[in-house]
Amino acid sequence: MNQTVAVDNRRADLVRVAARLFRERGFDGTTTRDIAEAVGMRSGSPFYHFKSKQEILAAVMEEGLTAGLPAAEAIAESALSPREKFQALVRAHLEIVLGEGHDFIPVLLYDWRRLTPELRERVQVLRDRYDQLWQDVVSELLAAGLLRSDSAVARLLLMGAINYSVLWYKPGQGLNLDQIAEEAVSMFLGPQP
Amino acid sequence: MNQTVAVDNRRADLVRVAARLFRERGFDGTTTRDIAEAVGMRSGSPFYHFKSKQEILAAVMEEGLTAGLPAAEAIAESALSPREKFQALVRAHLEIVLGEGHDFIPVLLYDWRRLTPELRERVQVLRDRYDQLWQDVVSELLAAGLLRSDSAVARLLLMGAINYSVLWYKPGQGLNLDQIAEEAVSMFLGPQP
DNA sequence: CCTACCGATCGGTAGG
DNA sequence: CCTACCGATCGGTAGG
């Protein structure tokens, strides 16, 4: 049963393994041979599933975005207060950026520039949806008087602060993800009223 | 006169040109041939000045840090109020991250991971000095009650917000550097009292 | 998906 | 700093 899914398992294997290798070594530091070997294929076989190495990169990023969008959408559309909504969004985002086994979005953050213009445009469609969710929540914060800033720049600064953690966070050292989320929210919004 | 400086001009040329190319195309997207050609050398000649391509990368980063440190130190040691000091530091940092012709620090932010462990350790010494300046100013903000957060994480989040702008800032579009600095400061510290 | 391979690129070097 | 070059790597492909 479930033949349809099984048929595509090899492609999914390639994407998952590529995500891990790209995150660890970077796009240029990973060869298609590395990826093939890691899933038990011969060196040319990834190109049966993907037209080019860059298509694998785009697939990794798209996988990360489509996997992360539902949770973020649920938060944005929930009945939480603006502050709680923001806190939840920050926490969920930290998970996909820093969480164990979550390699997809870090690859997007590290190697966005390695995409060809065409692929970048394709992935950007999904990225826009994600950014729009943040924009909506930031707008709610502004409307509630919890944040003072130009709305677009505020979002970019906030997301930058969070995303940049991919460069300094070390699992098991210092604060955990819950604590970082709390620090970030209280730094941006001030202490709870 | 000034022979000593003139002798090293070719090396300095290589570093300056490499910085521009690395920023535009990334470390892996730039060949040593590209760099040689851009300064009017033959393909093998950069290796008369540098032992390896990675040594060029390290030189670019060290140039950026040593050029940026004096201004930041002057701000940190000045008699400005904590808030003014922070504002000045943010503005100065935006300049070396986003300012025209300032390619060195963006290269550091983009391609830090391409350094070998040995070179990374060498450049880290300078980076630590820069980070310490920020830490000091952040500590002053905390002491003055202008910022509520764990000190180390606060610095990382703040620097992340600023550094990440290298990925979204487009010169001539949207806010200019002065305006971004103001937005950032008022978002982090709240409106001026 | 494998076999067998190519064509180009690229960092780096010897010798001058 | 140039000439001339190597040795390895790598993305990608034809044919099955």
Image: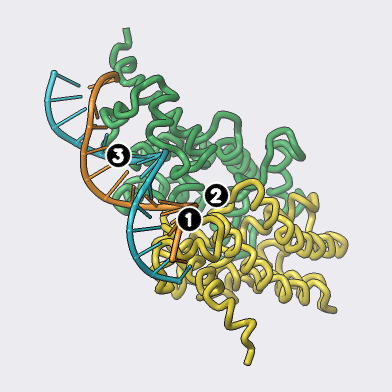
Chain colours: A yellow, B green, C cyan, D orange
**Residue at 79 percent of width and 71 percent of height:** A76
User: Is residue A172 in view from this perspective?
Assistant: yes
Tell me which residue sits at (42%, 47%) in the image.
B127
Q: Look at the numbered discs 1 and 3 and tell me whether their residues touch, using CB distance below 8 Å.
A: no
Name the residue beneath numbered marker 2.
A114
- Residue B139 seen in the current view: no
Residue B52 has which mark? 3
Residue A82, x across and y down, in percent: 81, 70
Q: Nearer the viewer, mark 1 or mark 3?
A: 1
Say above or below: B8 vs B159: above
Residue B172 at x, y percent in the picture: 73, 33
B40 and B171: which one is in front?
Answer: B40
Which SS class for mark 3? Answer: loop
Task: Report the residue marked by disc 1.
Answer: A27
Of marks 2 and 3, the one in the foreground: 2
Real-space CA distance between mark 2 and mark 3, rounded to the nearest whole angstrom: 23 Å
Disc 2 element: helix
Cβ atoms at labels 1 and 2 below 8 Å apart:
yes
Given the image, what chain letter belongs to the residue carrying mark 1? A
Q: CA distance from mark 1 to mark 2?
A: 8 Å
- Specify the subunit that label 3 lies on: B
At horizontal 55% and vertical 49% (from top left) the residue drawn is: A114
Question: Three-letter amino acid code at disc 2?
Answer: Arg
Crowding at dot 2, Cα within 10 Å, few <14 / some 14-19 / many 20+, comes out as some
